[in-house]
Image: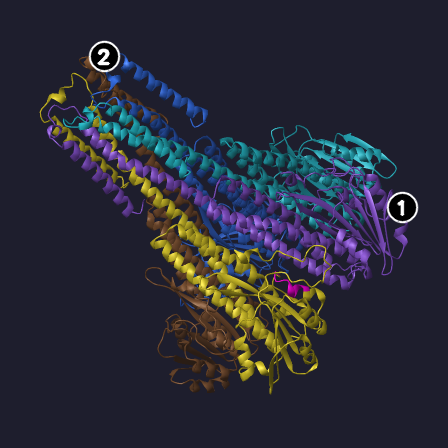
Chain colours: A blue, B cyan, C purple, D brown, E yellow
Amino acid sequence: MKERSSGLQSRAAGLSPGSLVHVGERKVDKVRIRVIDYDGDNVFEKEVGSVEECYPFRDTSTVTWINIDGLHDADVIGKLGGHFGIHPLVLEDIMNTTQRPKMEDLGEAVYLVLKMIETGPDCEIGAEQLSLIFGRNYVLSFQEKPGDIFDPVRERIRKGQGRLRKMGPDYLAYALLDAVVDDYFVVLEKLGERVETLEDELISRPDRKTLGDIHDLKSKMLFLRKAIWPLRDAVGRLERAETPLVKETTGIYIRDVYDHLIQIIDNIETFRDMLSGILDIYLSSVSNRMNEVMKILTIIGTIFIPLTFIVGVYGMNFKFMPELEWRGAYFVVWGVMIAVGAALVVFFRRKKWL
Amino acid sequence: MKERSSGLQSRAAGLSPGSLVHVGERKVDKVRIRVIDYDGDNVFEKEVGSVEECYPFRDTSTVTWINIDGLHDADVIGKLGGHFGIHPLVLEDIMNTTQRPKMEDLGEAVYLVLKMIETGPDCEIGAEQLSLIFGRNYVLSFQEKPGDIFDPVRERIRKGQGRLRKMGPDYLAYALLDAVVDDYFVVLEKLGERVETLEDELISRPDRKTLGDIHDLKSKMLFLRKAIWPLRDAVGRLERAETPLVKETTGIYIRDVYDHLIQIIDNIETFRDMLSGILDIYLSSVSNRMNEVMKILTIIGTIFIPLTFIVGVYGMNFKFMPELEWRGAYFVVWGVMIAVGAALVVFFRRKKWL
Amino acid sequence: MKERSSGLQSRAAGLSPGSLVHVGERKVDKVRIRVIDYDGDNVFEKEVGSVEECYPFRDTSTVTWINIDGLHDADVIGKLGGHFGIHPLVLEDIMNTTQRPKMEDLGEAVYLVLKMIETGPDCEIGAEQLSLIFGRNYVLSFQEKPGDIFDPVRERIRKGQGRLRKMGPDYLAYALLDAVVDDYFVVLEKLGERVETLEDELISRPDRKTLGDIHDLKSKMLFLRKAIWPLRDAVGRLERAETPLVKETTGIYIRDVYDHLIQIIDNIETFRDMLSGILDIYLSSVSNRMNEVMKILTIIGTIFIPLTFIVGVYGMNFKFMPELEWRGAYFVVWGVMIAVGAALVVFFRRKKWL
Amino acid sequence: MKERSSGLQSRAAGLSPGSLVHVGERKVDKVRIRVIDYDGDNVFEKEVGSVEECYPFRDTSTVTWINIDGLHDADVIGKLGGHFGIHPLVLEDIMNTTQRPKMEDLGEAVYLVLKMIETGPDCEIGAEQLSLIFGRNYVLSFQEKPGDIFDPVRERIRKGQGRLRKMGPDYLAYALLDAVVDDYFVVLEKLGERVETLEDELISRPDRKTLGDIHDLKSKMLFLRKAIWPLRDAVGRLERAETPLVKETTGIYIRDVYDHLIQIIDNIETFRDMLSGILDIYLSSVSNRMNEVMKILTIIGTIFIPLTFIVGVYGMNFKFMPELEWRGAYFVVWGVMIAVGAALVVFFRRKKWL
Amino acid sequence: MKERSSGLQSRAAGLSPGSLVHVGERKVDKVRIRVIDYDGDNVFEKEVGSVEECYPFRDTSTVTWINIDGLHDADVIGKLGGHFGIHPLVLEDIMNTTQRPKMEDLGEAVYLVLKMIETGPDCEIGAEQLSLIFGRNYVLSFQEKPGDIFDPVRERIRKGQGRLRKMGPDYLAYALLDAVVDDYFVVLEKLGERVETLEDELISRPDRKTLGDIHDLKSKMLFLRKAIWPLRDAVGRLERAETPLVKETTGIYIRDVYDHLIQIIDNIETFRDMLSGILDIYLSSVSNRMNEVMKILTIIGTIFIPLTFIVGVYGMNFKFMPELEWRGAYFVVWGVMIAVGAALVVFFRRKKWL
């Protein structure tokens, strides 16, 4: 699976730290930059063509959300990062899509990197890296490709629903984080359904595909766990962070996301336990069924063995075999054989072997 | 199983945080609101028709317990929560029946969410979410459906038994929590009996149903563990909480509940260990029995193989086979065959294969 | 097994906390109360008929040890507890024999509950609950039934051996605790011998009983672990307790008990590891032996199969089979068959299958 | 495997602590000493013939990097260490190539020992010990043999690229550490590819080699884990170290390395989990395939058993067997046998055994 | 195995704490007392006949090392302990050879108990208990029997090598501890070699002995782990101990021993992991080989089954069987049988079953 191989590449050895090199698959052709600027009263929204158009927003008092779709253009990210005073190591992390989720307090800003997870129709899992940076009056978000996950947040900003317009960039960052974590529930629910389908299948009719499915789901759970487990720490540190950038009113919302993450991890662990249980049951019932078949076949063989012996006896060519001469001996032998066969069947039934 | 799939849904993605949406199965038609108001001298008890009737109790000095049965009515919970000054995120949690047990210090009140667990006649397990909020002079309790678990507490209030009437809302909240935890013992005892029945069955007569039963009990233990484990943390935090809402005299009682929870978790872990042991023994004895059967069948076959060979020899049609001519050769061959068969039986007995 | 089911019952749901109800098996008919009162110079010892006779000892300056055998009489325990000012929840715990070992600092006294463990002749394990309460000048001990485990302590008090008479109630409590823990060593040693016997048996001659024995010992280790593990915490807390009731000179002795408990737990874990190893070896050698038997049986069959084919060939009734006419062909065929059989035996030997 | 046996030898028993004895394989003939001395403006680089030539650099204000290739010469290391005031125990550690990665704050300098890991063409893994010591104005690095891993760092010093020339010895030490850790990614990526190849192979065509490969990869992961796990602690301590030798500007870079290490360990754990899963699947599919083969063979046998019985019946030599006389009986028997065979095939198909 | 049963006996129940009773095997006849007294300038060494001769050394300013070989003489240990002011509980511990390694700060002295481990020619492991007590100017060491492990230390004292003569009793205690820990490396290296031999054997030719060897090595690793794991804690506490008895200059040496212990434990864990892997591979390859054999045997049988059927057909005695009359039919049947046999062989080859 593609997703599992990620998380391994680093910058090419020998490059100076802080060099901006894109690591990962390039998912879009052109970088797309969208700016939303708002305060309680007004909203301004624009898709800009060059990074420079974003510069003026740094110094306004309104909240500015700059969303970058596409991480391959070192020029765009370098310029934007430079203008907003982001440390080169952080910019390097943004461009390297194999980051482990983490939170860093940069002093003037907070950096949070995490994975957006999506499932396809066949439950295949894809991950996209999202970097969030928020400062005093701005939020920068870096995605690998455009997606619709943040559209509801944009809509809430446009319509002034909820408290989003009244609060600062920390709350906007929370809203984005919350949208991503809510999506985890969707993914997990899909996988959970498959786990339960598998469990039901197991009881009704296990086949060889089951084994592959169990393995596949286990790998997916492992992948989710690896993507989400460190995020819990990161959000926990965000909650406890003593940065003035996270206001106290936002703290309770971050605590809520943290609770959701614990709940998700709890569920992943439960699913992993269930899958282990299913695997055990599967293996033992496959082995039991096989043994059952072999036993029945062997019993069939065992019933015929003495009969074949008997017919062999009367196939012998001795000159003097009294039975051969007797009239009706043939039918007596048939009777004996039927009796022996029946006796064996009864015996095996009694022993509960049949 | 139904219960295991819970714990996964969150609010529909895109909804603003704090939106009151009921998540979970709707278990009652109409929300039922019961109010008990008491102090050391008087008790007042009423089932009210509308939330507004509860409002006045907020400002009395007596202890008021408002019990809500049914979580699907956002209007009722929103109004009540608004009047008592509960944070919208908490109200959202109350209506979402997939919460993980937790405790939150809301400043003016303490919020505790936990699972009530009940068993049916066939040991099937159901969980219901209970939210407890207690403040300076009130306790709010939110259940999914009416139940009889709190009736003894109501009775003690009515009769003025014990210290319940003399103490504050923290003690009432403790009494409710204690009633739920006492019920865990009942559930666990039932499951424990089944584990022990299973163990006895295992030694006397294991069959295929056993495997399903082990799997089923393991799932149930997993479910209990998931429901109770986080409650231990929550109650632990409640005990250590530096909130003036929990008086020192109540602290020792909460410590007692905490001890009970540790004892319950201990037992769950023991049962899980026992079930693992039972599974191991089951698998190995099933496999042993099967092997035993195959061995005996194979031995039967092996005894007849040389005999069949012998009769085959004398079935050959060679012109010159001296034995065929001999009188009595037939009986000698029978003697030889019986001797060979007996020798093999003795040999296998000696080897302890039979 | 009886002992494993314990640890589950709590007070009947609906009872007010602090209600004195005996939970557990009633092991004696009548409660027995023994008082020993001593200081450096004098010892007074008496078996009293009613609780009231113990009252005066509360206010003497000498050390008083009141030992209660039998926990079913709520009246006796209630009165005694009331007179010595013990919290009702603690009295409830004393009467409920399903407690998890724990230590509680009651301010005026220290409460320690633990399990006394004894083995019968067949290594069956029984547990009895012991509650110790010691205050400024008294020790109360509550056992389920009279036993001889404390007799050596009584003897040391009577004879004034060691430092027991010169020290306070904390040292007496330590001496009782130490007697119980020393008994754990005896139990563990017995079980350890059985584990080693099992290991030796395993190598010489494993049979089906072995599996049951392993399972039985594993259950016993689980039971011991559950009884002793929490006691370690309790004693650890006692050692670190900042209560003036535990004098510094006694502290080093409690530390010694703590070390013993760690050593015991260490050994339990080692035995559990050993049992797991024994189980693995047992299962794999049972399976190996079975396979070995099947292989030999199959080889016997396989040697006869071509021979039976050969005799079948010459049993055919074709008119024109030159060999049948030849003189000596019969003996040649015998030679061929012996050669084939021998060749197969040699072949299987070479392959190390035989 | 060679690498696994390392990590065991200590100095020969009886030697005084601090005795300089080389432990490990000698990988070069002659010790090679390279000096690079630089500040923001100038770079001086030289391969020196004797240790004494390095002495003057201790007292210059420029940053000096002395690289030693070859650890077997106690004289060289003793003199250099003596001149730079390194504790004899540390020098002993440098010469003993079986060190566990660790960091030590020596007061005047910081000592870091770690493993450089390289893979050969066949994925075989080799480890080389690297000791780094950095003080106020120098970095000493001790390698077992010359390698090209630090060449890019040298190049950056020569060309004045990045911030290397502008920063102190702590940054140089970081750059070396970073080069080593970057190499871990390369190694892990190679191994990861093999794990995934293995997984694909498993599904398409498992054979006996697979088992050896799984075992081999598991050993390699164990080896990596043992080499890298303690380095995480060491780097973590370096980051938190309150030594003035590590400047705050360098701290963020060390944190970056620390994150990389966590990511690497995460991946190792994931690979280990994957390998366990692969092993389970492998074992169960090997066993399934084997059982399948045995089942089909047994079914073939079972189909012929009744047929052989039938032909046996008509091979009997009874005088009075009516069927033998009938014209066409022979063909009827053939018909019967074909019918029986076909019926059995259909029966086994229905049962899904075939 | 003898060594595993240790660690269980405590003083006979009922004995007063602090009673000096020897627990364990008596390994020497007569207690041997050796005294070495030294300072920077002089060394005095003597084997004394009675404890009393050691008394004067307590009050000299030189460092005195009193080494006792043999722990069964309560009189010797009691007197010596009494003179040096050692707590009776500690003396009890010294005489009980089943102690868990631990460190105790006695105020005026430090008590360290640990295990000396030795291997015999056949890799059998023996443990001996060593108690070290060091105070302001003395070191007492208690061994079960005389050994040569401390001879190099004695030699270094005599010759004045290293810093031993210049430093205090804490450094001497370190030197003894270091000698013991260095010996662990030797033992572990021997076991490690056996683990690797086993791994090589496994790949070339596994047999039944392998299983016993794996079990044996696992037991040994368990034993080592139990002996060394707690020592790590003890040495860690010694390093952090805030006792003036351990000087700062000695601290770094103790830290070095601590590092060695971590390295040893690391290796034990690695070996345990390797053994588990080896066991898995062993079991699966034994089972594979067995299955392979059974498969080949069954295939041989299956090839002959249709042939035997064919010869059976022509053994039938029907009057009208046209084939029997045909000239050459016999040879045609042979041709058919060879063809069938060859076809089956080809078929099984194609299927890769052969």
Q: Amino acid at mark 2?
A: Pro
Chain at tag 2 = D
Residue C182 coordinates in the image, percent (x, y): 68, 54
Q: In front: B135, or E178?
A: E178
**Residue A45 vertical position relative to residue E307 in the rendered view, above or below:** below
Residue D219 coordinates in the image, percent (x, y): 42, 57
Q: In this rendering, does residue E314 appear at all?
A: no
Q: Quadrant where the C terminus of chain A lies?
A: top left
Q: Which residue is mark 1?
A: C53
Residue B93 coordinates in the image, percent (x, y): 64, 42
Residue with the most extreme front position: B327
Q: Is E94 included in the stretch rendered in magenta?
A: yes
Give the extent of the magenta segment.
Answer: E92-98
Q: Amino acid at mark 1?
A: Glu
Which residue is found at the position 51% from the left and 42% from the top?
C210
The residue tagged with tag 2: helix, strand or loop? helix
